[in-house]
Image: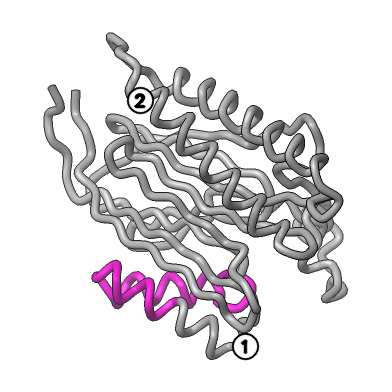
Amino acid sequence: MKAPHLEIYGGTDIGSRTNNEDFFISLPRFRFFAVADGMGGHNAGEIAAREATGQLSKWASRFFLCPQTSIFPEHIISYLRFSIKNTNRHVNDLSKTNPFLKGMGTTICCLSLYGETAVFAHVGDSRLYHFHKTLTQLTQDHSLANKLFTTGNKSSLPSSYKGIITKALGTTHIIEPDINSFTIKKNDLFLLCTDGLTDFVSDLEIEKTLQQTPSLKKSTQKLIKTAKEKGGHDNITLLLIRVSSFFEEI
């Protein structure tokens, strides 16, 4: 079976906040990646994001370390849904153990690459993009602004709507993530990011950066720098994964 050889680089910046509530995980061995953007008072958002990414790391390692004769995209989709739902319950249960954690939650956006297939899932407004000469947003924000926009209310939205998400991991006991898949090819590039990037850097600016800067490290640094220069006050996190080639996996 063909397997992707990957180039990976990620970065996170506190912005002008006093703490960083963003987390990202990169598990090259399992070809599993995720970003999370926590929310909640005190340090609750940081705890929610950290717990969510930690739990998903455990579920991913359990799945891909299990001896299996073959894995198909539908198996990954099913297991990813199972993992996110169990992670959601874990964060939700934890939020009830301490008054300071009440109401905490986090976005989650994750990507699993297996064979020639990409499976991705998300809850909230952290995003996944696909870049191959041009940039395409693969996820649709679970946000009030996006909901109003997609239902036809395209008049100028109040700025207060911008940060309101309609779905988050851990805020309710049951969650249903959006999950999709598609076939990947050589030189495909994936960008996982939190809204600390996309609130301040347009898709066109992201596209131009990726077109003009082949180095994943330099692209990451440039995008974070651009977000900060454009007034980015939020935590900024992004993870770039490029399919550089394929090889026969035994």
**Image point 24% across, 54% down: which residue?**
7
Q: Quadrant of the C terminus?
A: top left
Q: Position of residue 111 (x, y in %)?
A: 45, 42
**Image point 41% across, 59% down: which residue?**
239
On screen, residue 92 versus residue 187, left or right, reads right
**Image point 57% across, 51% down: which residue?**
50
**Image point 48% across, 29% down: which residue?**
59
- Magenta residues, start to end: 197-223
What label does residue 231 carry, if any? 1
Q: Quadrant of the N terminus?
A: top left
**Residue 206 is covered by the magenta coloring:** yes
Establish if 198 lies above or below 93. Answer: below
Establish if 208 lies above or below 131. Answer: below
Mark 2 or mark 1: which comes first in sequence?
2
Q: Position of residue 148 (x, y in %)?
A: 84, 57
Q: Quadrant of residue 153?
A: bottom right
- Say few, some or many: other residues with alpha carbon within 10 Å of mark 2 (under 14 / 14 to 19 / 20 or more): some
Could you say which is closer to the camera, residue 96 or residue 219? 96
Q: Position of residue 25 (x, y in %)?
A: 44, 50
Kind of element beneath mark 1: loop
**Residue 22 is covered by the magenta coloring:** no
Identify the amino acid type marked 1: Gly
Establish if 170 lies above or below 189. Answer: above
What label does residue 65 carry, if any? none
What label does residue 64 carry, if any? 2
Q: Quadrant of residue 208?
A: bottom left
The count of marks equals 2
